[in-house]
Amino acid sequence: MSSTPDPTHENIEIVKTNLKNIQAFNDYIYDHGQVYFTNCFLLLTSKDDSDPGLSIGLSLLEASFAALGDVYGPLGVFAATFMCGEVDSWTETTPPQLNSVFASMIIRYQQSSLTFDSQVADYISDPTSFWTKTFTWNGQSCTLGDLATFSFPDEKDPNFFTYAKACLTALDKAVWQQVLKAKCVITWWAWIPSGQVDPQPKMIK
């Protein structure tokens, strides 16, 4: 990516605005994404009654943000690199509030989303101190100061909802993938030639 711009007053204000818009975007995804958890568990007649662990919470958050990098050009790549890079870094340095056991997948996701907001709030409070902090994801890197090079849409911009739709679709897919891995048991029958041992049902979990 291009060289990071200097932390001038103007650039600092652009970064703060972008961070606030990204924070609001994350809140929108969380608020409107909860229904996908309910829908998935109801359709599977299963209960969301256990904590899938740190990695699942992070993968759900990251999967939703990643959609920006897949379809929205340079702005999407910048935004996804910052957002996913922040979340991805938690696998090495886990925020204390995520080192707990939660009652369900939705609460794990909620706490991951709240933690993202909290981390972004830290950057908003003093962007200069974090100006050269690097975020790396999917082979791309950017610094906090690079957020001065574009404008992330707010809710007055129709693009906000276009981006949100893509991220919500990605979240829905990620929820199904994680729940199917954790909850589903598939029964299949192995074919065995005649004269050998009778076929037995095989259970895969």
Image (cartoon, rainbow, N blue to C red):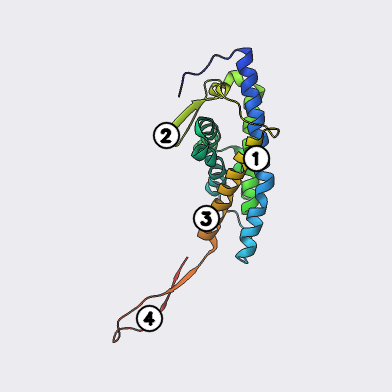
Disc number for residue 139: 2
**What residue is shown at x 66% (from left), y 57% (from top)?**
38
Q: Dots 4 and 3: beta carbons under 8 Å?
A: no
Q: Which residue is mark 4?
A: 199
Q: Nearer the viewer, residue 164 or 106?
A: 164
**What residue is shown at x 63% (from left), y 38% (from top)?**
115
| Spatial CA span between label 3 and label 2 | 24 Å
Q: Amino acid at mark 2?
A: Gly
Q: Dots 2 and 1: beta carbons under 8 Å?
A: no
Q: Which mark is in front, 3 or 1?
A: 1
Q: Earlier in the sequence, mark 2 or mark 1?
A: 2
Q: Dots 2 and 4: beta carbons under 8 Å?
A: no
Q: Which residue is mark 1?
A: 161
Q: Check disc 4: other Cα within 10 Å, few if <14, some if 14-19, many if 20+.
A: few
Q: Is residue 33 above or below residue 191?
A: above
Q: Earlier in the sequence, mark 3 or mark 1?
A: 1
Q: Earlier in the sequence, mark 3 or mark 2?
A: 2
Q: Position of residue 9 (x, y in %)?
A: 63, 13
Q: Nearer the viewer, residue 169 or 51?
A: 169
Q: Is residue 114 above or below residue 49?
A: above
Q: Which residue is mark 3?
A: 177
